[in-house]
Image: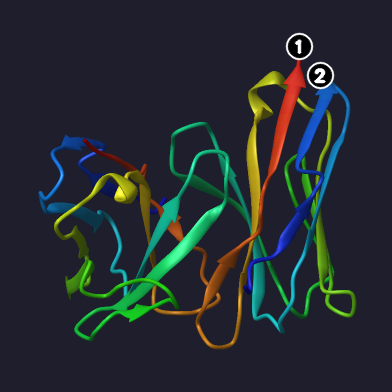
Amino acid sequence: SQQGEEDPQALSIQEGENATMNCSYKTSINNLQWYRQNSGRGLVHLILIRSNEREKHSGRLRVTLDTSKKSSSLLITASRAADTASYFCATANTGNQFYFGTGTSLTVIP
Amino acid sequence: GAVVSQHPSWVICKSGTSVKIECRSLDFQATTMFWYRQFPKQSLMLMATSNEGSKATYEQGVEKDKFLINHASLTLSTLTVTSAHPEDSSFYICSARRDRADQPQHFGDGTRLSIL
């Protein structure tokens, strides 16, 4: 399987704390994307980082990419209860294929 | 923003029925659309990639005769689950992407399919 892996599988934090999720993948990539999914809904695109980029920011989100280790991390700062959701990384390879990681379930406790 | 509409959102039907799910990109032209299947508390599994005007590319283990995909226009792709059985019950999600591989995918809200 070309599916990536994320850790932790589940994360529970207090509101205001930072949340960090990690993603590891197996093949060479064109870009890596992070998505959020609320229960029973579709996915919302959060951020895209290209293979030649190392770090990207968007609001309270910070994404890093280490292609030598085939890994990425998503940091959510100053978390809010509304951030409670599942977060997935997805890799797009040069063959136009797209694979999701196993996901991290984040619970932010008010 | 890019909006993708998926319809229907929930289907309950008897075993043996064929079910069609539509995926539309409302405000952009989608050269490529993707169909995923998701089991409870699991990640999305790519079923197939479809490019407008050509045959879909199915992932290993996905029966192309069971899951018929048609991408007849730049704004519409359909997935037909033929002769559905209870094991086909799942959450099906489509996504659409503009014409470059470095563009993000935009997802529909998914279709919950329940086969009795």
Amino acid marked by disc 1: Pro
- Asked if B102 appears above or below A41 in the picture, the reply is below
Q: Residue A37 occupies which quadrant of the picture?
A: top right
Label located before the other in sequence (1 or 2): 2
SS assignment at label 2:
loop
Inspect this view and state whether residue B4 appears: no
How would you rate the neighbour count of disc 2 (Cα within 10 Å): few for under 14, some for 14-19, many for 20 or more?
Answer: some
Structural distance between the alpha carbons of marks 1 and 2: 5 Å
Residue furthest to the left in view is B17
Task: Tell me the quarter of the image containing the C terminus of chain B.
Answer: top left
- Checking the image for residue A15, the label placed there is 2
> For the point 50% across and 39% down, which residue is it?
B40
Query: Residue A38, how many percent across, how many down?
Result: 53, 33
Query: Residue B99, how many percent across, how many down?
Result: 39, 78
Q: Mark 2, chain letter?
A: A
Instruction: Say which residue label 1 marks.
Output: A110
